[in-house]
């Protein structure tokens, strides 16, 4: 999961891009990067770490120009330590392009092979974002009739890209000397929006993963980029857009509303905060039917994304709401940290239980979701150690039983506590006195009621239905083997097995 930005301004954009990345730091704490353009020259700085750690004053001074793109990253497969896979990426032909990507390509191994054998392009990292950049560059080269470029040519290239690329992708790119491009996959899985700021010198534009980046930097949100749509802002501030996919439909990732997005963001016409409130209301209805519901003394959230759901749940049930855990904001999210031991140790560093709120009480803990169960298990134990008589646990999302292949780090089934287990088996594994999950339909309803236009979602990690239609059991097995560092030798054909070794271990780090 990542955050992306693209800006065309009338003044230098380095500080604007930096501020926008800070507003989207929640979308990626592993790496950050900014690329600006001055005339036809790109300037770039990127590296591992949080935004404030990657950029120093000297780095900002080396990023002149009135247009640029930026990126924050969580890796979604493989090692997080390779700074060469930080984004944006750059390719020098044709025209010169920088690109930043949020999402995962499901056919990146096939595309890598095409780049090597057909398009004669070299992929230098294990990132599917670099693959995506080279596909765009190749299609721009094919679409251009000469040495110049216009918006219509750019849109033709994006249309050709949609025909080749599968998976989830929201993209910002800058073409040297021409302008900034943004586009979204035809299924609309990953979010993308744009806004405008009116100045005396003319309009300025920003493209971003979340509306909070626009509003926090002085831009007025205009709308979401539609599935399959591309928007292009030239360096004079002229804005154009076009639908570039033959058949597009809106299927946003519902995990954005459950967990990833900031609550003050709007995604596809839905307030993330309001969606979480409604999830709490529906969860309250489920809890009210439980035989132990009358035993609950107090409702507590697991900070911080579960607060709206927990507050609304407590109000609906007429129960006291208390903050029982204090969160250390300087420790990263645990379920996407590499290594189970690191995640487990990080829970106690991240959260501290306040005994005064737990002692002698039957506590209902509310979390936004349960993925690996590491955090939940430790939190339940912390509540008991702090004096809770009984610990009930509720999840505002359904059980995560399947891998996510569209940009969230849940690729292996063995890591998911709900995979292959009943709810009762999960309860025992977590050590809770009772466990309640939201059901899939209630989760969907909580979002749809806020925007009836949303009739379909990517809910693959909950129900195993992959919206792109190309995710097979064999594909899931390959990415799990790649994550575990094992070569894919399932084919009897030795040359094909060698090709799998060459092209099959592409990291998804959008």
Image (spheres, rainbow, N blue to C red):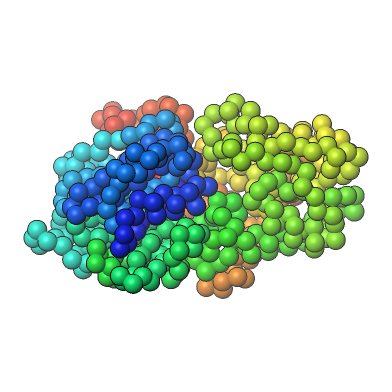
Observer-nearest of 64 and 127: 64
Q: Which of the 4 quarters of the picture holds residue 358?
A: top right
Determine whether, in the image, residue 402 is placed left or right of residue 146.
right
Residue at x-position 52% and y-position 41%: 410
Looking at the image, which is closer to me, 206 or 336? 206
- Decide: is 162 above or below 340: below
Counting from the top left corner in percent of width and height, residue 59 is at 34, 40
- Say which of 156 and 267 sits in front: 267
Q: Where is residue 68? Give x, y as percent.
A: 31, 53
Whether residue 496 sits left or right of residue 147 in the image: it is: right
Question: Farthest left residue?
Answer: 146
The image position of residue 435, as x and y in percent, is 76, 45
Residue at left offset 54%, top offset 61%: 265
Q: Quadrant of residue 190?
A: bottom left
* Residue positioned 28% across, 49% down in the render: 64
Residue 376 in sight from this viewpoint = no
- Relative to residue 36, is residue 342 drawn left or right? right
């Amino acid at each position: 999961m990542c955050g992306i930005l693209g800006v065309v301004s009338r003044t230098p954009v380095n500080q604007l891009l930096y501020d926008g990345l800070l507003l989207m730091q929640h979308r990626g704490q592993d790496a950050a990067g900014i690329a600006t353009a001055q005339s036809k020259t790109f300037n770039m700085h990127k590296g591992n770490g949080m935004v404030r750690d990657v950029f120093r004053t000297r780095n900002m001074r080396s990023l002149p120009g009135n247009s640029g793109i930026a990126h924050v990253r969580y890796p979604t497969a493989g090692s997080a330590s390779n700074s060469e896979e930080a984004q944006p990426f750059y390719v020098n032909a044709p025209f010169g392009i920088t690109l930043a990507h949020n999402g995962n390509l499901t056919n990146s191994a096939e595309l890598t092979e095409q780049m090597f054998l057909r398009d004669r392009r070299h992929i230098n990292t294990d990132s599917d974002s670099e693959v995506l950049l080279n596909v765009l560059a190749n299609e721009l080269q094919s679409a251009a009739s000469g040495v110049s470029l216009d918006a219509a040519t750019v849109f033709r290239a994006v249309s050709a890209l949609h025909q080749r690329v599968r998976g989830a992708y929201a993209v910002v790119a800058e073409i040297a000397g021409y302008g900034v491009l943004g586009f979204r996959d035809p299924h609309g899985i990953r979010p993308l929006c744009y806004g405008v700021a009116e100045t005396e010198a003319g309009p300025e534009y920003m493209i971003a993963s979340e509306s909070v980046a626009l509003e926090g930097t002085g831009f007025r949100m205009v709308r979401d980029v539609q599935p399959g749509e591309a928007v292009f802002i030239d360096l004079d501030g002229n804005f154009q857009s076009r639908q570039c996919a033959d058949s597009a439909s809106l299927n946003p990732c519902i995990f954005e509303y459950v967990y990833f997005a900031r609550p003050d963001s709007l995604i596809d016409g839905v307030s993330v905060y309001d969606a979480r409130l409604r999830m709490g209301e529906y969860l309250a209805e489920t809890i009210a039917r439980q035989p132990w519901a009358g035993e609950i003394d107090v409702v507590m959230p697991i900070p911080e994304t579960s607060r709206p759901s927990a507050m609304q749940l407590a109000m609906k049930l007429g129960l006291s709401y208390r903050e029982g855990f204090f969160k250390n904001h300087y420790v990263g999210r645990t379920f996407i940290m590499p290594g189970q031991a690191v995640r487990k140790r990080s829970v106690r560093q991240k959260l501290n239980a306040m005994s005064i709120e737990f002692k002698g009480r039957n506590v209902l803990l509310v979390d936004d979701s349960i993925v690996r169960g590491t955090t939940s298990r430790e939190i339940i134990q912390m509540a008991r150690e702090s004096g809770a008589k009984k610990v009930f646990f509720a999840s505002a999302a359904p059980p995560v039983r399947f891998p996510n292949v569209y940009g969230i780090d849940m690729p292996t089934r063995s890591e998911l506590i709900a995979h292959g287990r009943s709810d009762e088996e999960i309860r025992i594994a977590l050590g809770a006195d009772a466990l309640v999950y939201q059901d899939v339909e209630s989760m969907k309803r909580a979002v749809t009621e806020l925007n009836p236009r949303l009739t379909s979602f990517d809910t693959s990690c909950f129900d195993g239905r992959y919206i792109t239609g190309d995710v097979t059991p064999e594909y899931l097995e390959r990415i799990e083997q790649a994550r575990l560092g094992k070569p894919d030798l399932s084919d009897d054909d030795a040359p094909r097995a060698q090709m799998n070794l060459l092209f099959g271990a592409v990291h998804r780090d959008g």
